[in-house]
Structure formats: structure tokens, C-alpha cells
């Protein structure tokens, strides 16, 4: 099997339907999309001398050719290494070298520092700008090769983790993993019609790129914003132009979209679904989003090792405000998706009772087989067929999973376990608080003490005393923050996740 077969089927069924659009304009029908893919695949094999199993990298912002290159590489039997173009050149060069990528596709004025090592030796043999004549010549009309047959376990997508701790690791996603991930979307997350569109507002190198699969399966339209990135005003404009719109957004993006829509009051008629994930969405924030954008939300929980496919909180659950445990369900990440098994285990490795927190483990047909060229990390993370996520959570009696925190973010103070997420859920409801992140700080007396980094709303006021009293009314005294740091912003990575390691490092540097 070859995951590119889903494009072949879409071309056969819907040759004249819109396949890839830029802004409000259709760029390629499925006929043109498929032709472009097979011509580029032929050039990859014949002009770039790539062979089945070779890796090619894509280090560019969202762009229509991003989608073309992905499918062309798969068609030719190659593996794709998606790289966020906003990363530091040293991070990009590490991923290129570690993956053994021989060709890298970029877009305009990309830093040459990324393509050489410390001795100035070239890391990749070819760097091709999709805005160049070189790229245009690769997609010249020619006799195309046949699609390369691949085995289900062959590598298709070598996704590098964000590297919030240590060097990023290359997660090996197979053709079968990707196929099952696309099917899981259609079964568990949302229906897709050929007349629908997905707006790629989040990076194609991450979750949004994975969601291109179910939309190609159904012959739907892929819309690339002209800016190539998330601009809430631009997204609202696109919602006015396209029908059956869905998109994947990180919670921070949802929050920005809500803020703009509160002022603009645009019609949401074209918007079908917003899938959110990739970080905590606080109950107060999703309630506000439902008020402003309507009952259009689905939440997913996944990791790079099981991309977008561990649990799902459906529209039905999110919109069932009459349920007796509605608040608890909104705070959860939903039920296990159909293609995985999910369990909670304690330190002994045995399952824990309902309601008791432990580490989340998962196995199934979408879960990666391991890390590229890293046997030790693979053995530590995959145990007896189960992926150990490093996330802490618990099941309720109905099977809904609630995330508490990453295991590395757990604060142990005076011998008590404190989960930052619980404190953040409280502080974010204060009328003066815009954002908050809670971390542990070294304490000679307690081992660790709770420190809250707080971003206030413009013009708002709150100090330690105000927030301390607010917490004491809502959570146990030992959980409340001992220290507050009021900051202008929280450091985030390119996917909108708060970088708690940077906050902890700031506390260490201040102590020293």
C-alpha cells in the first residue's frame, strides 16, 4: 500500500473538483493536483536520483506546493521530514542531519545556515526553492512513473518532536499509521463531504498537515491562507468565502479568533468545525468560544507518537450542556478514538482504579513504531507494545479521560503531589487574568514551591494578595502559589505551547 493512493482515488472520483486553493482562489483541481504530483515524483526519481526509502525534507511555511511535495514524495516511495521553517537554523540543521535527508524544499530567502554543519560541510545535496525556475522545471510534463508500491510499515512521515526537553526525536509514522489516522478522523472526529474545505491556518508541518489526509480521502478542498500563517482576520474573511469549513487550531489560536470575532461579528455560516488540541484549553475559554463562534468545536488529544489520535471530545459532548457532569466533561479530552486502546497505569505499571491519576499509555494502529536511530529512547517509551506518553490523567466512570499534566511538570511540595493544570484552571477564571502558567521552584524547606507566571489583561489589576485570596476560596491551601511573577507574555513554541522549561530556567537564573 501507499498512502498516495488516497489522492489517486480522489482524482478518479472528483477530477474537476477544487483540490488546492490559495485564499479565495482555486489553484488546482484534483486532475491538476494529481498530474503535478506524478510529474514531480518522476523528477524526484529521475532528476534528483532519489530511491524508495530516501528522506526528503520540507522546511517552509504553509504553501500550496507543500501539499504537492508531500504526495509526490509518497508516490515516489520516499519519506517526508516536515520541519517548521520558524525553527532556529541549528535546530533545522540537526533534523536534516539526523534524518539523513538528501533534498530539502524551501520557500524564499531561507537561511543558508541551516544546510551546513559546524565545519561548513553541506548537510543536504540539494536545496530547492519552490519559487524558483529549478522547481518549475522539475514539474515539467513528461512520461510519469508508476506509483511505488510500499509495505504498510514502511516509513512515510518522519516527524520530529518539539524538543521541549533535550534534542528532538524523529517519530517514525508509517503508511498504515497515516491511513488509519485519516480513517479515525472520519469515524471519530468529523464527517467530510466533497463540497467541504479545510483551511490550513496551523502549520502543515504539524497537526493541520495530518488532517489533509481525511479531506483528500473525501475529495474536499484544501485552502492555504495567502499569508501562509494564522492571521485571525484573514481566517474570518476566508470563512465568508468557503462552505463547510473546518480547521485545526491550537487553543491560543482559538482564543485570538474569539477576540477578533467579538469585535467583527462576522457571519459564521460557512464554518462547520474547529478541532482544537495541542495544549490545554481551559473550561472558561471553551465556554467563551462556544458563545462567540457557536457549537462547532471538537477537541482531540494526541502526541507526535500517536498523531491527533488518542482521544476525542465530540461536538455532541461539548454541546450537551444539560448533562449533570457537563463541566467535568468540558475539562476532559473525551473518549478513546476507535483505532487505539488507552489505559492509565501507576508506577508499578499496573492499571489504576477509575478516578485515580496515573500515566496515560496507548497502543493501536496509528501509534508509531519508535524513534529514528534511537533504540534506547524507543525501548524506554514503548513497553510491551504500549506507548508511554509521559502525560498524567484519570478516567471517570464513563470512560472520559481528563489530563492533569505532563509527568515532568508535576510539583512535589512537602511530600504532596501538586498538578499545575488544576491551579491554572482556577487562576484563568479571575477577571484580570489573560494567561497563566504554573511551575515548580526549588525550595530548601519544601523541596519545591508553586510559582505562577501571570499575564494580566490590558488595563487590569491584580497582585499577589488578590490572587492568593482568590485561590484560597477555590483550592486547598497547600496548592496555592507561594510566588507570583507578573509578565507581559508567556514564552511559547511555534505551535502555541507554553515553554515551561524556559520559565523554570528563568527561576533558576534568578536564584543564581
Image (cartoon, helix red, strand yellow):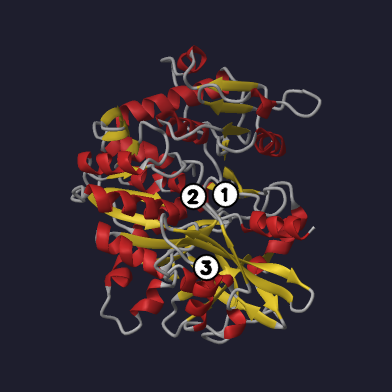
Q: Is residue 257 visible?
A: yes
Image vertical order of residue 51 relative to residue 341, above or below: above
Along the viewing direction, whichever of 284 and 81 lies nearer the viewer = 284
Estimate how packed mark 1 is, as few (under 14), some (14 to 19) or many (20 or more) residues with alpha carbons within 10 Å. many
Q: Which residue appears at 46% of the width and 82% of the height? A: 396
Nearer the N terminus, badge 1 or badge 3?
Answer: 1
Q: Image quadrant for the C terminus?
A: bottom right
Q: Which residue appears at 44% of the width and 79% of the height? A: 399
Estimate how packed mark 3 is, as few (under 14), some (14 to 19) or many (20 or more) residues with alpha carbons within 10 Å. few
Distance of mark 1 from mark 3, alpha carbons?
A: 47 Å
Element marked by disc 3: loop
Q: Are marks 1 and 2 in contact (CB under 8 Å)?
A: yes
Distance of mark 3 from mark 2, alpha carbons?
A: 48 Å
Residue assigned mark 1: 173
Nearer the N terminus, badge 3 or badge 2?
Answer: 2
Along the viewing direction, whichever of 158 and 156 lies nearer the viewer = 158
Left or right: 433 as drawn, with respect to 170:
left
Residue assigned mark 3: 463
Element marked by disc 2: helix
What is the x, y in percent for residue 345? 62, 78
Q: Which residue appears at 54% of the width and 26% of the height? A: 106
What is the x, y in percent for residue 366? 52, 57
Give the numbered dot on residue 178.
2
Nearer the N terminus, badge 1 or badge 2?
Answer: 1
Q: Are marks 3 and 2 in contact (CB under 8 Å)?
A: no
Give the numbered dot on residue 73.
none
Estimate how packed mark 2 is, as few (under 14), some (14 to 19) or many (20 or more) residues with alpha carbons within 10 Å. many
Left or right: 113 as drawn, with respect to 425:
right
Amino acid at each position: 500500500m501507499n498512502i498516495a493512493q488516497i489522492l489517486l482515488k480522489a482524482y478518479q472520483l472528483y477530477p474537476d473538483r477544487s483540490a488546492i486553493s490559495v485564499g479565495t482562489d482555486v489553484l488546482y483541481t484534483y486532475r491538476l493536483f494529481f498530474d503535478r504530483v506524478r510529474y514531480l515524483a518522476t523528477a524526484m526519481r529521475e532528476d534528483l536520483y532519489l530511491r524508495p526509502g530516501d528522506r526528503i525534507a520540507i522546511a517552509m511555511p504553509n504553501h500550496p506546493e507543500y501539499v504537492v511535495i508531500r504526495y509526490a514524495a509518497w508516490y515516489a516511495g520516499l519519506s517526508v521530514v516536515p520541519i517548521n521553517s520558524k525553527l532556529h537554523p541549528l535546530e533545522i540543521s540537526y533534523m536534516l542531519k539526523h534524518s539523513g535527508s538528501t533534498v530539502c524544499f524551501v520557500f524564499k530567502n531561507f537561511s543558508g545556515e541551516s544546510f551546513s554543519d559546524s565545519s561548513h560541510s553541506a548537510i543536504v545535496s540539494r536545496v530547492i526553492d519552490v519559487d524558483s525556475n529549478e522547481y518549475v522545471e522539475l514539474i515539467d510534463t513528461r512520461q510519469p512513473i508508476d506509483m511505488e508500491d510500499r509495505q504498510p510499515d514502511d516509513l512515510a512521515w518522519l516527524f520530529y518532536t518539539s524538543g521541549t526537553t533535550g534534542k528532538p526525536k524523529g517519530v517514525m509514522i508509517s503508511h498504515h499509521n497515516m491511513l488509519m489516522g485519516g480513517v479515525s478522523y472520519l469515524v471519530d472526529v468529523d464527517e467530510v463531504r466533497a463540497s467541504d474545505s479545510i483551511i490550513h491556518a496551523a502549520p502543515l508541518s504539524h497537526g493541520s498537515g495530518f488532517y489533509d489526509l481525511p479531506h483528500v480521502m473525501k475529495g474536499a478542498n484544501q485552502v492555504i491562507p495567502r499569508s501562509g500563517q494564522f492571521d485571525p482576520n484573514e481566517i474570518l474573511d476566508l470563512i465568508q468565502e468557503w462552505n463547510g469549513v473546518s480547521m485545526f487550531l491550537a487553543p491560543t489560536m482559538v482564543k485570538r479568533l474569539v477576540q477578533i470575532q467579538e469585535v467583527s461579528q462576522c457571519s459564521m455560516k460557512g464554518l462547520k468545525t474547529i478541532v482544537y488540541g495541542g495544549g490545554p484549553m481551559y473550561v472558561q475559554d471553551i465556554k467563551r468560544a462556544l458563545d462567540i463562534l457557536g457549537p462547532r468545536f471538537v477537541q482531540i488529544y494526541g502526541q507526535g507518537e500517536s498523531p491527533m489520535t488518542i482521544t476525542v471530545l465530540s461536538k455532541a459532548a461539548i454541546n450537551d450542556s444539560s448533562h449533570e457532569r457537563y463541566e467535568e466533561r468540558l475539562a476532559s479530552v473525551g473518549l478513546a478514538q476507535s483505532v487505539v486502546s488507552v489505559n492509565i497505569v501507576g508506577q508499578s505499571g499496573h492499571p489504576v482504579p477509575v478516578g485515580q491519576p496515573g500515566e496515560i499509555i496507548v497502543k493501536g494502529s496509528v501509534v508509531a513504531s519508535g524513534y529514528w536511530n534511537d533504540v534506547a529512547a524507543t525501548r524506554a517509551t514503548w513497553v510491551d507494545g504500549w506507548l508511554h506518553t509521559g502525560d498524567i490523567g484519570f478516567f471517570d466512570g464513563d470512560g472520559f479521560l481528563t489530563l492533569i499534566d505532563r509527568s515532568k511538570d508535576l510539583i512535589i511540595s512537602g511530600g504532596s503531589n501538586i498538578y499545575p493544570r488544576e491551579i491554572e484552571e482556577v487562576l484563568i477564571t479571575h477577571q484580570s487574568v489573560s494567561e497563566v502558567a504554573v511551575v515548580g521552584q526549588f525550595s530548601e524547606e519544601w523541596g519545591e514551591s508553586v510559582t505562577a507566571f501571570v499575564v494580566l489583561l490590558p488595563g487590569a489589576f491584580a497582585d499577589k494578595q488578590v490572587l492568593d485570596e482568590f485561590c484560597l476560596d477555590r483550592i486547598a491551601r497547600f496548592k496555592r502559589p507561594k510566588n507570583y511573577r507578573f509578565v507581559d507574555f508567556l514564552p511559547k513554541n511555534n505551535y502555541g505551547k507554553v515553554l515551561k522549561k524556559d520559565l523554570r530556567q528563568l527561576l533558576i537564573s534568578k536564584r543564581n
